[in-house]
Amino acid sequence: MAGGPRVRSTTAASASGSSGTWGGCTTRSSSVCPRPIYRGYHFDELTKRGLWAFTENYVLALSHDEVTHGKAHSPRRCRETTVQKFANLRLLYGYQWTQPGKKLLFMGQEFAQWSECTTRRRSTGILLDWEPHRGVLRWIADLNAAYIGEPALHELDTDPAGYRVVDLDGGVAVLGYERHAIDGQVLLALCNFTPITRERSIRVTHAGYWVEILNSDGAEYGRIGDQQRGRSFRPKRTRRGGGELVVTAPPLGCVLLRWDGK
């Protein structure tokens, strides 16, 4: 896929008349379904998209094909406890929303529909009577607000300059990366794919304060850890510039921090 001309650019410039190429979330959903102890062996399914992420204008779709034909919705495919199933799903959405590319879900995925999609019946919105499903819906709403309000999450989707991996550890299934905006704004996303709290020392681009703006383990979404939202972090300066930031990643969680420039 890499190396050739883009099939999709702008609608006007594209011979296909489309501005986006279907990127899919098949590998990402399958990588969070194995038991956490085995996820390190599937970590390449998360990281290999770095080889081709900027060769097209990708749409990151959690495909309807992944929640039909007897496959069931994502929460039911994970083998953990019920609480961890929902944490897994919030983690998957957090990863999807903070990666380069446009986002797409299908009917019922925004509130963790339990049964698979079918044209024979309407989506089971009654599930919103239960707090775990409302928590997923709140998480999607807050991710959408951040996606719109934070230029670093969308401005350089097709430019490698907008994405930088800063923490990659398949042994403990942790992935951290920065997203950059045209005006210099920087966000840091840290994803922990195991049910164990991880404290990570990360070399970031800028020294100064970093403020937590989203945490999938927040009480309003369905906390399984013991963290508080809205924390501030100040990294130690390094000789080579930037700073070394110590961040605690919640179990089966995604954390998003913003550099405040001070």
Image (tube, rainbow, N blue to C red):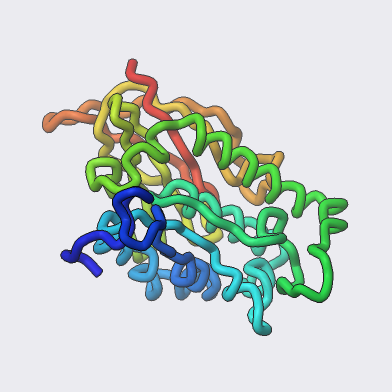
**Residue 98 location in percent, x, y?**
44, 46
Residue 160's place in the image compared with 118, above or below, is above
Instruction: Please give the name of the residue rendered at 27% of the width and 54% of the height, measured from the top-left corner.
Output: 54
Quadrant of the snapshot with the N terminus:
bottom left
- Most extreme residue toward the left, as rendered? 240
195 vs 186: above or below: below
How many numbered circles does the render carry?
A: 0
Asked if residue 2 can be seen in this view, the reply is yes
Residue 219 x %, y %: 69, 40
For residue 242, what is the image quadrant? top left
Q: In this rendering, would 226 be left or right of 34? A: right
Instruction: Identify whether 192 is placed above or below 43.
Output: above
Which image quarter holds the C terminus? Answer: top left
**Residue at position x 65%, y 77% in the image:** 68
User: Outermost residue toward the bottom?
Assistant: 70
- Taking the image as shown, residue 106 lies to the left or right of residue 4, namely right
In the image shown, does 99 or 225 lie closer to the viewer?
Answer: 99
Q: Along the line of sight, which residue is nearer the eye, 132 or 41?
A: 132
Residue at 69%, 67% in the rendered image: 81
Any part of residue 168 in sight = no
Q: Position of residue 47 (x, y in %)?
A: 33, 63
